[in-house]
Image (cartoon, rainbow, N blue to C red):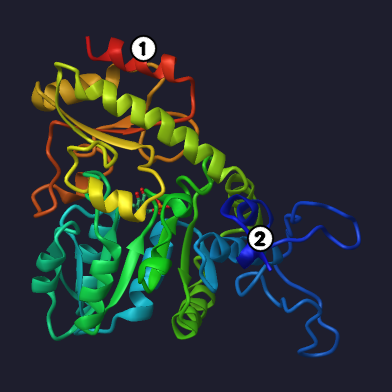
Amino acid sequence: MTDQLGFSTRAVHAGFDPDPQTGAVNVPIYASSTFAQDGVGGLRGGFEYARTGNPTRTALEANLAALESGRHGRAFSSGMAATDCALRATLRPGDHLVIPDDAYGGTFRLIDKVFTQWGIEYSVAPVSDPDAVRNALRSNTKLVWVETPTNPLLNVGDIPALADVAHAGGAKLVVDNTFASPYLQQPLLLGADIVIHSTTKYLGGHSDVVGGALITDDPELDAAFAFLQNGAGAVPGPTDAFLTLRGIKTLAVRMDRHCDNAETIAEFLSGHPAVAEVIYPGLPQHPGNAVAQKQMRRFGGMISVRLRGGRDAALKFCSSTKLFTLAESLGGVESLIEHPGAMTHASTAGSALEVPEDLVRLSVGIEDISDLLADIENALL
Ligand SMILES: Cc1ncc(COP(=O)(O)O)c(C=O)c1O
């Protein structure tokens, strides 16, 4: 039923109808690790043990699938747990995958330090160049893994073009949709096979819960995810599932405010003498602007800037803001600032994915824009 509804309606309603017995409009936090059976195998509501399934998590999973216009959703204890599951469900020793040349540091670290030990090979390619991705394919390539926009350089990948490249090479396309959120972009509708999220970010939206998700239309992939979700057990607890669902209900209104504020700040920074480059997909000079306009509703709340004064100026900016809190992570209601080279992307040092040392990443929150602008202006004095 919820498939036919608009995005904001799905965000509020999908996954749970008011409880028929009590009328509760929110899914309860089912703090139960096990479920009584009526005779051996006689499951009352389809639940037996909470690693396999828990009703609060089931509501979240149905909601996540509806948000991405997908058939199947699976929730995990973190974005990295979801990433790990997607990789193990789809790759075998001897297989190869292509990852962004500016992938999230944690994704790169997991593949580079762990999966290579189990016989998985990888190559890097810029997500903004489908030809380069095509050239990186090998006969044993099983996955093309992209983020769009990427973390932290905000490069934009043309999802339909990348899906064509992956499929022509016999590979599946995975899109990490964390930066856009399903409100701004729905990769399954554009040809992707798997969407992954760190729900810690915009979906949760309040910096109070860590989680991850995998969404697909393919029942075989979903069965493989479900097998590993239960078999390896990286599941969110019911309170985390509840908090994530609660955050999702306001995703659409939060995202519009994140976008409003980020657009104004990107514009302001573009004219600032201390700034060498503003990287924001909504700016006309961004090389991915046309593709972003095609596949995104708006351009998101993340901005990266390169400072004229190099690393020292970048570090000074990061420690001079008052409202923008110096912290890792992103996508919460509060504005955050960080130095990717020393923080979120430190694991890429010395690799092909190393980020520029003059780079600062802003996660623009939903505060009053006048206060955010004043904070940035003062910090850049
Ligand atoms: C794009 C992206 N993907 C995945 C992750 C991993 O998510 P988590 O921190 O929830 O494990 C992050 C975390 O920052 C991220 O930015």
Identify residue type, mark 2: Ala
Instruction: Give the residue drawn at x 14%, y 68%.
Output: 133
Can you tell which quarter of the image residue 278 is in? top left
From the image, which quarter does the C terminus lie in?
Answer: top left
- Residue 218 vs 108, above or below: the answer is below
Instruction: Give the residue drawn at x 50%, y 73%.
Output: 229
Mark 2 secondary-structure assignment: loop
C-alpha gap between disc 2 and disc 1: 39 Å
Mark 1 secondary-structure assignment: helix
Image spot of residue 205 (x, y percent): 52, 42
From the image, which quarter does the N terminus lie in?
Answer: bottom right
Tell which of 126 and 1 is nearer to you.
Answer: 1
In the rendered structure, the answer to whether residue 18 lies left or right of residue 215 reads right
- Residue 363 vs 154, above or below: the answer is above
- Residue 293 vs 174, above or below: the answer is above
In the rendered structure, the answer to whether residue 232 lies left or right of residue 58 reads left
To which residue does mark 1 refer?
Answer: 374
Image spot of residue 163 (x, y percent): 28, 72
Can you tell which quarter of the image residue 23 is in? bottom right
Tell which of 98 and 290 is nearer to you.
Answer: 290
To which residue does mark 2 refer?
Answer: 14
- Residue 143 vs 259, above or below: the answer is below
